[in-house]
Amino acid sequence: AQSVTQPDIHITVSEGASLELRCNYSYGATPYLFWYVQSPGQGLQLLLKYFSGDTLVQGIKGFEAEFKRSQSSFNLRKPSVHWSDAAEYFCAVTQGSQGNLIFGKGTKLSVKP
Amino acid sequence: GAGVSQSPSNKVTEKGKDVELRCDPISGHTALYWYRQSLGQGLEFLIYFQGNSAPDKSGLPSDRFSAERTGGSVSTLTIQRTQQEDSAVYLCASSLRRAANTGELFFGEGSRLTVL
């Protein structure tokens, strides 16, 4: 069965430091991959998505992610974290032709001043 | 409003009672999803509606859970004989097409269910 693994439950970084959140997927065919962010008290918002083509995708709020087929990974990165980036981040993959998204368990990001 | 609307935002119920959670998707969105978010468990897929097709119910955890979507718009998730383990935030999302085509689901703010 298709699955998404986010190995880090909670990460703390200092403001201005770089960030990388890990995501690994298990999927038989070429996956469609997504990152969503859930800020405190707000709904989930799409950060970026990968369907095909260039394996480095740019998203909103200065985030980017790189699809690596050989590692079954789709890690999220940001060069310089802002305090407002504190939130929970979810990686997701489509499940075949059904159309629904399968989400990972999320990584909570805390930002130190 | 223009977003996905869910009600109630909070619901406290006693074990064994039935509850109904409502989702009003963005107008024109043909796809509608229900997810459950429990602490430390991420988002658990429950059910997916796409247009007039038969829904994908593969994520419903038991036969106490059911959902319907009337007229291709509003959806109601019903939990019968609630149990304490049903306590969670129930999230609804809608999209223009199935996720594989557009990838963007628009989420509501959720209905927090507490079963005492």
Image: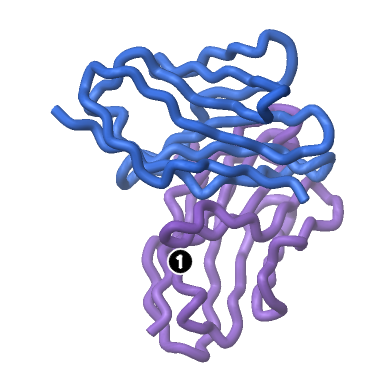
Chain colours: A blue, B purple
Q: Residue at x 37, y 66 (%)?
A: B10
Query: Which residue appears at 46% of the width and 81% of the height?
Result: B84
Please tell me whether mark 1 sits on a helix, a strand or a loop: strand
**Frontmost residue, B24 versus A110:** A110
Residue located at (50% from left, 32% from top): A22
Residue B109 drawn at (x, y percent): 43, 49
- Vertically, is A105 above or below A59? below
> Which residue is at 27% across, 18% downward?
A17
Mark 1 closeness class: few <14, some 14–19, many ≥20 residues within 10 Å: some
Q: Nearer the viewer, residue B67 or B72?
A: B67
Q: Give the labeled residue for mark 1.
A: B88
How far across and down, in percent of the image, does residue B112 sit? 41, 64
What is the x, y in percent for residue B102? 69, 27
Rendered position, A90 above or below B104: below
In-image side of A95 versus A105 (left or right): right
Q: In front here: A8 or B1?
A: A8
